[in-house]
Image (tube, rainbow, N blue to C red):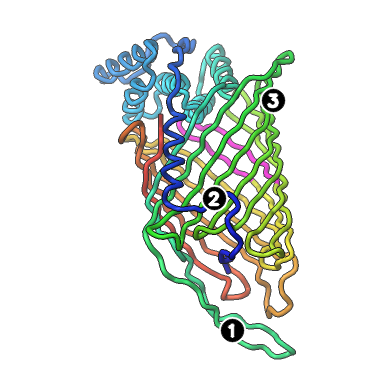
Amino acid sequence: MRARPGRRPATWWRCGPRILCRVAGLCACLAVAAPVAAQPALPGAARSTLPVDGAAIEARFLRGLALLNGGQAAAAIPLFLDILAGDPTLVRVRLELARAYFAAEQWSRAREEFFAVLSTDLPEPARLRVLGFIRAIDARRGFDWDLSIGLVTLGERRRYDSDTVDLEIAGTVLPFTLERDTDTEPGLRVTGAARWRQGLTRVGATELVGFAGVDLDALEGPGARYDDITIGARTGVRFLGARSSVVAAAFGRSRHVAGDGFEDRFGLDLSFERRSAGGVSVFGAASWAVLDSAISDDRDGHAVAAQLGLRRSVGGRATLGAALRVEENRVAFDLEDYRDTELRVFGSYDAVRGITLRPELSLRYRDFRDPSPLFTASPNERAVQVALTVQKSDLFLGDGFSPFARVSHTRSRSDIDAYSYTESEVQIGLERRF
């Protein structure tokens, strides 16, 4: 069962609709950045490799290249994306798109595109330059921000196999009926982040960069009944090598449900990435956090997590990856004292007509460490989730936002029917591209 909010007052703020306006305004302010000088073109083919029947495409490509080299990266990005919508295999266009994202300080987008082309047949000078761009992205300075807004259904989306649970009391098995909230209502999901980075020092080929940032994940409806808002802060240092990076950071996170404090987390994390010249990346992370519950003292404790994964680019237009994650919650409350083991397979594929597909498959096993002796069967959960995000990458609304839709379906099974459920979710919204 999901925990309900308690009576302890919120520790950071009283959540409400105004918080979304504040954060959106903060992200908008941080979006104002000084123009970035255009980066030199990548070495390799001096002539574009556009289709023979694409005179108009050639003209758009040259126009985009002129805008990019003239310091107008934001104006060049839609032109390159429009060309790739017709033929996602054009490596030269994708390289210039990555360079435009880089100049526009859209670091995550630039990194994705540079990483994708590593699996193509690039000349060695171009490959080395691409690796140099990826390293420069990791060593970036200044501010950047991301924002996503979508329509969702709030409330209890889970449909349980049963509302009756059998408990053994004094040698007698008695059925108990669980009273669950089954109402739903439309709402908004807002996710965003704002980050600042500053170079600190360099020792030989290793560079040290400091960073700090805040992030938001909020569900908010017409009232506060189903509000679920998490805000976090993180600061640390990044060690950069030629093809690797290591990050050490401290973080804090506060979650509020229905306007009341729910849980605070404070901890440390360590992560790394090692990439090859052929488009293969190995990554991992470990974290430790103290849990401070606003519900009850028996939910206080700590959490430990570790992750190891691999991803690679495929054909210059797709990525494929897998990650194994283990997380332990250690608290006194038996339904929150568990170990999660999750295998996630994910990918991204640029199809035609500007459609980007991001499928995901997740297998999770939840092992409750010390379940209540009243249960007549094991409450352990075995869950399978499939999800697909579809984005129209060449369509822009407002100031660089693209529409997307995400659907997911989860089936979780337990030996106790009252804890077996099916959950489906649909989200339609806008995501900032540049």
Q: Secondary structure at mark 1?
A: strand
The image quadrant of residue 335 is: bottom right
Q: Earlier in the sequence, mark 1 or mark 2?
A: 2
Which numbered disc covers residue 184? Answer: none
Which numbered disc covers residue 176? Answer: 1
Q: Is residue 399 left or right of residue 29?
A: left
Q: Nearer the viewer, residue 332 or 102?
A: 332
Q: Earlier in the sequence, mark 3 or mark 1?
A: 1
Q: Mark 3 is on which residue type?
A: Phe
Residue 113 appearing in the image: yes
Q: Nearer the viewer, residue 117 or 289?
A: 289
Instruction: Report the magenta residues as a range.
Output: 306-323
Q: Mark 2 is on which residue type?
A: Trp
- 310 drawn magenta: yes
Q: Secondary structure at mark 3?
A: strand
Q: Are marks 1 and 2 in contact (CB under 8 Å)?
A: no
Q: Position of residue 257 (x, y in %)?
A: 53, 58
Which numbered disc covers residue 13? Answer: 2
